[in-house]
Amino acid sequence: MRFSVKLSVTICAVLGLALSANAFAGGGLDKPEVTRTLRTARSTEPTFKIESGIDGDVFPAFANYASLQTPEQRKWGVVSVKVSNPTDTEQRYRIAVRVSGWSDQEVQVVTLQAGAARTFMFAPSFLPRLYKNREITAATAQIKITDIAGNPVYSSTVPVRMRAVEDMFWGRGFKYAQFIASWVTPHDARVEQVLSRAKELMPGRRLPGYEEWKDVAGQEQESRLQARAIYDALQKQKLSYVKSSLTFGANTNISERIRTPRESIIASSANCIDAAVLFASAFENLGMAPVIVLVPGHAYVGVKIADNSEKYLYIDVALTGRVPFEHAVGSAERGLARFQSAQITRIGISDARRAGIYPIPQLP
């Protein structure tokens, strides 16, 4: 895993999903921006300002997140349109945004009071092409604005760069680490196949996840057995460490390529963060509570030992191809013990789901 900036985020600091970075299109808005100017000599023409992506880059995980929200919920968008109304009368507009060849068209009908300025966030639903894209690609966002009668008011295009579906933007200080949950894909057919093999390594050929009738001690033993079975199944599939974090575009020092679980399984290759999201996918599929743990230069996976416990079992899954399960558990325990709490970031996948971060669409 390539972490080229120092990690100084406190435990669970990212779980609030602070999406206020000005790098985003229209970023920095806790709610739609409304400002009002003095009622003095006014221009008679509205003005429009367009911004796109994160410094012009569109990351699929972020685009998917924003497109699943309503315009009112968004704090930033794939494209933002700031409209200023310097006139003495209320204005209404129909704003249409599309990324040509990549998305559907999103339309918002907006109203601005006299003297007001407001920023509107757009995240149109993207076509399957976005989630199949494996390399940075140029695209064009089209913005068309009419009045309510349909008369043209403004039109423009802005260049955008569509990042590869595997590209993760961590942000400075790992501010957006919670988006790693987008790579946790519990329903992928390849993950299901791993679990099918893992169950054959379990007593009674069962992977039951958490069982309400068990006490904490009994569930801890069962959870450990299930984690071992998944580990051994992937070890039997020859999963081993291969670094592949190189990516292109803006902010390459705070972004990287991360394999999806499907890619890791097909290639039998994974670095630490690749393997962490793969194991987390298997645990989430079983209804268990996984956590991704980041420390400077490395990543681990953890799983809560019981539904009614706060204890976690941590695994150094980068070692899957090299050592037995118990050694990987011991490596995680020793590794985490070397860091202060301020150097450790834990991303609970269930917390991310509650924040609206869902798996990246997996297409055939």
Image: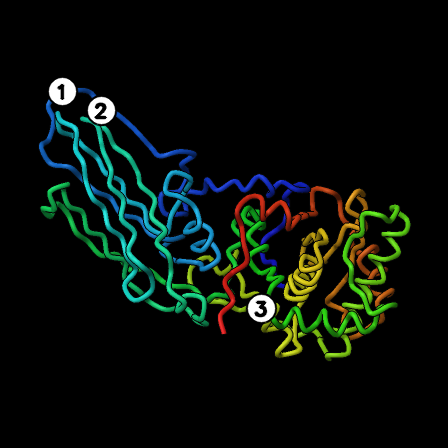
Q: Residue 132: which numbered mark, if any? A: none
Q: Amino acid at mark 3?
A: Arg
145 lies left or right of 364: left
Q: Is residue 119 visible?
A: yes
85 lies left or right of 216: left
Q: Secondary structure at mark 2?
A: loop
Residue, disc 1: 40
What's the image's color scheme? rainbow
Residue pictured at 57% horizontal, 39% vertical: 16
| Residue sitting farthest toward the right | 217
Residue, disc 2: 37
Q: Residues within 10 Å of mark 1 (few under 14, many from 20)?
A: few
N-terminal-most mark, 3 or 2:
2
Q: Amino acid at mark 2?
A: Thr
Q: Secondary structure at mark 3?
A: loop
The x, y position of residue 350, in whole percent, is 64, 48
Q: How many discs appear?
A: 3
Q: Amino acid at mark 1?
A: Thr
Q: Secondary structure at mark 1?
A: loop
In what quadrant of the picture does the N terminus appear? Answer: bottom right
Residue, disc 3: 259
Q: Residues within 10 Å of mark 2 (few under 14, many from 20)?
A: few
N-terminal-most mark, 1 or 3:
1
What is the C-alpha distance between the residues marked 3 and 2? 49 Å
Residue pictured at 70% horizontal, 42% vertical: 342
